[in-house]
Image (tube, helix red, strand yellow):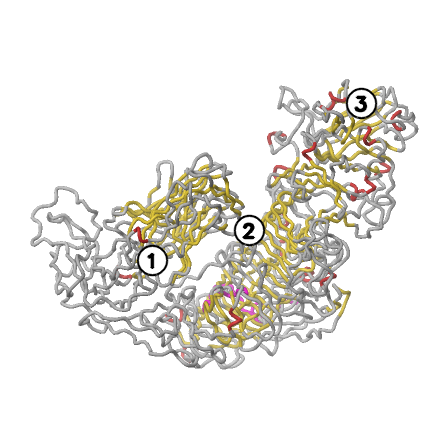
Amino acid sequence: TTVAPTLLPTEFPTTASPVGTPFNSGVVENGGFESGTTGWYAQYAPAVQISLVSTVSHSGSNSLLVTGRTGGWHGVAQNMLPKMIPGVTYEVSAWVKLANVASDTFILTFKQVDDRGTTYNNAGRIVTAYQDSWTQAKSEFTLDTVGTLTELTLYAEGPASGVDLYLDDVSAVVLGTESPTTSHPTPSPTPPPTTAPPTSPPTTAPTSPPTFTPTPSPTAPPTDPPTTAPTLPPTTSPTTLMPTAPPTAPPTTLPTLPPTLSPTTLMPTGQPASPPITAPTFNPTLSPTTVAPTLLPTEFPTTASPVGTPFNSGVVENGGFESGTTGWYAQYAPAVQISLVSTVSHSGSNSLLVTGRTGGWHGVAQNMLPKMIPGVTYEVSAWVKLANVASDTFILTFKQVDDRGTTYNNAGRIVTAYQDSWTQAKSEFTLDTVGTLTELTLYAEGPASGVDLYLDDVSAVVLGTESPTTSHPTPSPTPPPTTAPPTSPPTTAPTSPPTFTPTPSPTAPPTDPPTTAPTLPPTTSPTTLMPTAPPTAPPTTLPTLPPTLSPTTLMPTGQPASPPITAPTFNPTLSPTTVAPTLLPTEFPTTSPPTPFPNNFEGPFFTSENSSENVIIPQPPLPVQEPRTNCPHLESGLLDWHDPTTWGGSLPVAGSDVTLPNNSRVIVRQPISTQLGLITIPVSSELIFGEDPSEISMDVSGFEVEGAMSAGSDTCRLETPLIITLHGSRPVDIATNSREASFKGISITGRLEMHGKRYYKTWSRLAKSVSPGDNFLFLQDEVNWQPGQEIVLVTSAVKDSRDWHQNEELTVGSVALNPVSGVKAVVYLTSSVQYSHVANSGYQAEVGLLSRMITIQGSADDSEPTDPDPLTCSGSARYGDTGRPCSDKELTGFGGHIMVHSGGQGYVEGVELYRMGQTNVLGRYPMHFHVLGNNCEGCYFRDSSVHRSFYRCISVHGTHNTTVSENVAFDVTGYCYYLEDGVEEDNTISFNLAALIHMLGTPATGNGQSTPLALQSETLTLPADVTASGYYITNMHNTIVGNVASGGWAGFAFPVLYSPLGQHRNDNMRPANRLSLLIDGNTAHSTGWWWSHAGAFYFGGSLYYNANDQLVYNAGRDQSHNRKPCLVDKCAEGNCDGYCQLYDQAWNKITNSKTYLVPSVGIGSWSGRMEVVGYEAHDVALGLEALESGFWIDDMLVVCRTGEPWLMPVDASPHRVKGDGFFWYDTGQEHIVSNSTFRNCGFRDGFDHYDTSPTRGCDGNSVNGCHGGSTVFGFLTHSDQFTPELMQATKDLRYEDCGRRFKLHDYRGDTQPSTVSGRNQNWVDVDGTASGLEEPTLIGSGLADAGLWWKIDDNVVHDPDGPLEFIRQNDGPERGLGHIRVEWDPSLHDTVGTSTCGNGQGYPCEAIGRVRHLGSLFANDPGLPMTAQPEIVGPVGGFGWLLTLDGGSPKKLDIRFVEVDASTPLILAIAYPLQTSFTITANAAYCSESEWYSCQESFTPVNSVSEVRNSDGNTYYFDASTGLLYLRVIQPPQTFTGDLTFSGTPEWHLWDNDSPGKWGNGKALGRFSRAGVTLPIQAYGPWLEIVADCVSSSGVYCSDAAPTTSVDPDDVCSVGYTQVSYDKCCNLSTGDCEFPS
């Protein structure tokens, strides 16, 4: 703990700059990137990528390009631990330039981990970086450490997600040593060698204190007032004294200061006009070895909080803005404006709105110069909410000006602020000054230009003085007065420095682990030393540490025989100067952990930082440690329950109902030995539970809380056990004849306050896998769990059901923190683990705490089901296993319940709900917020547990703005976390765990896309419970963050509700169409067992009332109930079924999701436009499936098999489970997949076309194999009825060790005839990463029945796996894809799906025509078969398509559903008899003629194919010699055929993706665009009509034959050229080529 010696700048190690680097990078390695990327790494790789760039640099030859950033804190980093020295000041600098946006913020940050924990120190203030120039971020940084420094990392970060940046010339150059910040003489150690700092602290202290030369004091008061301003600011202390020489003896007196002058104010020598208002910062009773004066927090000046402010703002003036804007000013006014807002606040009545910001550094500020004291540590905090953007960065910054110049010190690292919730920016800040401090300003800033923000609850509260950074004992000053700081300084100093008595160190380490519990609280450090008397001399030596014990690790060196079950909080081998371990809440044990067999401490270990590959799983906020205040049980005026006078002379007797006296507050201080009836708390009364170290217990039949019922408060959480047991047997008719809410329940119409001791975290993840027989668990988080508490170790098995699961309930023996690097806690168990539980780089099993200090439970005598499941039932096999829960059992559970209703309010935390919930009894759930609307805003149920629940966990019902957070739920019947009626919005469900969820009735399963309907009944109150899952989200307009679901039919269920349920049934809203608020960082696993489409995240299933007013649940795909997100509330417009215009369409978004161990699909969606951004799937049957027009998947990782054994029932096998990455569906879709990776997907054996690795894909083994039909990408090809349009596109894909990549999948088998959907399959491979060609590629079907339709030239690459054809798009100038539907015989087309061209039913679908490419190259090609299903998809931009029908030339032909880009002409040729004439029109849908828009366009004839090709698509050419009709088919708008874009009257033109829509709304053409990829969307309604004037033969065809039905058309090439492709002719002699023109 000794501070590094003072070295000159030249003595510090530096990294030599490579040749060509034009600057000194100091201690930064390779700061100019002239040695490649040496020394640097990407933060949050592999998503974030770094690469060397030689085309852009600030100096030298290179710079570093950082890409793939998905967060403001993503960037590039370097380890600085061995390079920077504590106490030294460096000038830190970097040059930055943005790559893809005009401007954004940038900052350099140091992450520092030492004995105080993890801190983020920003090297300078946020700067604005630009795309068109280099910007320097530069400041000074002093490395200030406490104890052992274990990590020091430099990060370059700051811009918003998606912003790429160039970095160059990064340096950290020593400026010199740090100046002392106090007036105490600083002894100088013996000068160290000039090569490196010492590796161990000195063993002796100076033999005498140093001397110093004080600043002289005046001998008499000044006689005149000052005439000039002082040269130093009045808050600077004059006592910054430097020693002149090594001391020879302690000083005996201090100079006498005049009583009218404070040494900290530096008043001028003239007579002051008024006494100083600041307290002295120099206490003359301090020892000369003390770093800073040790003052209590009460001695520092603070700003009183105004009335109504619910928090302590500390030294910040008016931090809650309850006194207007007093104390604050706009930074960069008048552009920046601040105003008081009373409609938005974090607490209290007001917040501050900051607007007009034109830079990231613009914000609001307060002068802190007279308020903060050097050397003192403050906890600085502010709450921020954005006003006009969804999210952006935010930071608090101190600007400090002193003798070293101007520095910007950030109070904490950049945080992400949001529009829909408040975010806290919080950290510790120590004011470190050099010389005279002339400015200290607090700024709130950070978001990008134009972002407005709300600010509230800004505070800077003293934590205490800074801990000494050396191993010298620290004496305590003379205790200060308790009333107020002194108004004048003392006039004399003590005659000798104080002495102190250190705690002795033992001479040897302990020989045995402790066996008894500690008598002191665990966070008490043995090193808080107080002087016993004034010392007679300073110590001459330091206490000696035993050689076998490190003071910073607290690990014994001996091997214990067994883990202790308790541990002392005082380790006798610690030095009196060793700082106590940094622990979280005050309950954390400081156990010296036993050491298991050493191999168990070998990694790799998985932490929260490396527990995922490309998603970011958020973590709950750290609890705030504050003194207990507002304890209801400690207040005066309470009546004692156990005092007979409270009840009029006699205590309540067993079985009696009890009503509290009116206007009373009654406290229960000890157990109540008798079982009572109903307890009624009148409106004017309150029942309070106190604390009893042994336990307080109470047995009742129920509570009716009209007033208040309290156990602790949110600032005074109960530290001793409280157990409330609810009694009552299940009535036979309870499912249909509901009882009052207080029947075996707690009915709250008043206020419920239950606050049990805070345990953090409530659940964690394994840091290392657990094997059967292990009796300890390594965790990723520090926990303060206690011996004897119950935990659940969550399954790592694939099946998780009542009849077969591998969850384990275990008991804590002891907990040790940070036993080894990479492990935050080890939990020792009282018994061994039975099953394997996995922790690998992709996923880790959870461990949840079930016990709490407060327990509310149903009685063991009358709560358990009387119809237990015998676990002997069976059904149809799932992957070989026939076991299943018995559907008619476990229907009689009758636990207790809590219901907050009728205007009540509930605040519950730290509570265990055990044996709660009443099966199939509506509204009787463990915790139920019932129809409170907005009247329970701020109500919560958090850091609690629910286990052995017979009906749900927490229901939020008709209630908004509540919080359900950090709870653990286990062994639950029915849906667990439950939004009941579909109207619930703006609630927060965050950081919860759900495990082992049981369905009611028979689990829903089925064939294809459908399942049997489930109907409401007495044994199935909610029919959706046949698919009971961890989370039931009926309305997506809520915040769902950081949760985990294990088990259940699905993990997260998002059913489609077309109307609300229950008493909200008639509300005018459609829950299914409400937009997602925030769904981020959620995980689901060990689910999806019962149906192949049951996604771990399941966006499907519909719940509605039938004609008999009975609830019906369709668990499968219900196309009559689709989710249709829209920016416009159609219900509010009066028609919930109203059409959502393209320009009003919205997308739901889920981010950072993870699934694993799912034998079905990771994410499954039957309907609803969605963006899935950031997604990992490990050990799944299928990564994702979606059936919706407009679906974007970005940053996806699918690992079909990780190599972990699949834990399944004995008869089941993973080789029966697919290992598929992604499936393209058959019709009506637009899917874009970008920036995604597939690993170990696709079957291995026989598929080595792309990868020959022996570990590629997965094989058919029974441990972790996969089905033989597995593929990375699959196409549904069973249907002739439903066929693809232009539906799918990809960009930036990666295959890692994959087997089969592509498969045209016909579930009927590979021997079936090809289908229309199989022949029409297509795919836009934007960059060739899907095909592997690494250039733009068009992918089409490789089925032989498609002829040469997709094999358009010899450069087409055939894929044998699909089979597919890969067309190189750059081989032609206008290559693209097009889609049309041609209709000529309505009676024929109407048979599709009924008697012809079915959906896999085996209906015939014979060819009745052909379409092929024009030209001699394709003259002998039979072409693509045309059937009664007349859809055509194919390559366009060539010479054209030739359509021929077996029946002849169609007399009338309609063209609909056009999808084609304007840059790729689609030329259609149709053969007609000679002399035929035509009327061709384009017709709009839903159109009325007006002066602005036309509704019909007549085509005009032209004289050549070239004219048609180069037209706007409103001409035709009929070749009278060949009988071919040519026209260009373009994609038209839906509702008009002409507009005023190019003329004063409505006019047809060639529309493209930039053409405006009708009345300026949106765009004229439908499209779906994401990630730089665009897919066209066909318009429903408009059509192109061709009417041929020919002789009809009593039908739809011309009677005369067309001449080209038997002969080829003219060649498409010029003389001397030969056709080599559908769009190219070449001179084979010269090599010259031509294209259509």
Instruction: Name the mark nearer the viewer: 3 or 2.
Output: 2
Q: 1253 or 1365: which is nearer to us?
A: 1253
Q: How many marks?
A: 3
Label 2 CA crowd tier, 10 Å (few <14, some 14–19, many 20+): few
Judge left or right: residue 638 versus residue 1249: left
Instruction: Name the mark nearer the viewer: 3 or 1.
Output: 1
Q: Which residue is mark 1?
A: 196
Q: Is residue 766 visible?
A: yes
Which quarter of the rendering shows the C terminus?
A: top right
Q: Which residue is mark 3?
A: 1479
Q: With respect to residue 1587, does 972 lie above or below?
A: below
Q: Residue at x 68, y 59 (%)?
A: 1024
Quadrant in the rendering for residue 481: bottom left
Instruction: Give percent across and percent down for residue 1010.
Output: 75, 54
Asked which secondary structure carries label 3, the reply is: strand
Q: Which residue is mark 2?
A: 46
Q: Residue at x 70, y 35 (%)?
A: 1579
- Which residue range is magenta in the image? 737-766
Label 1 CA crowd tier, 10 Å (few <14, some 14–19, many 20+): few
Q: With respect to residue 208, does 320 lie above or below?
A: above
Q: Are marks 1 and 2 in contact (CB under 8 Å)?
A: no
Give the CA separation, mark 3 to mark 1.
93 Å
Instruction: Give percent across and percent down for residue 514.
Output: 42, 80
Q: Residue furthest front?
A: 19
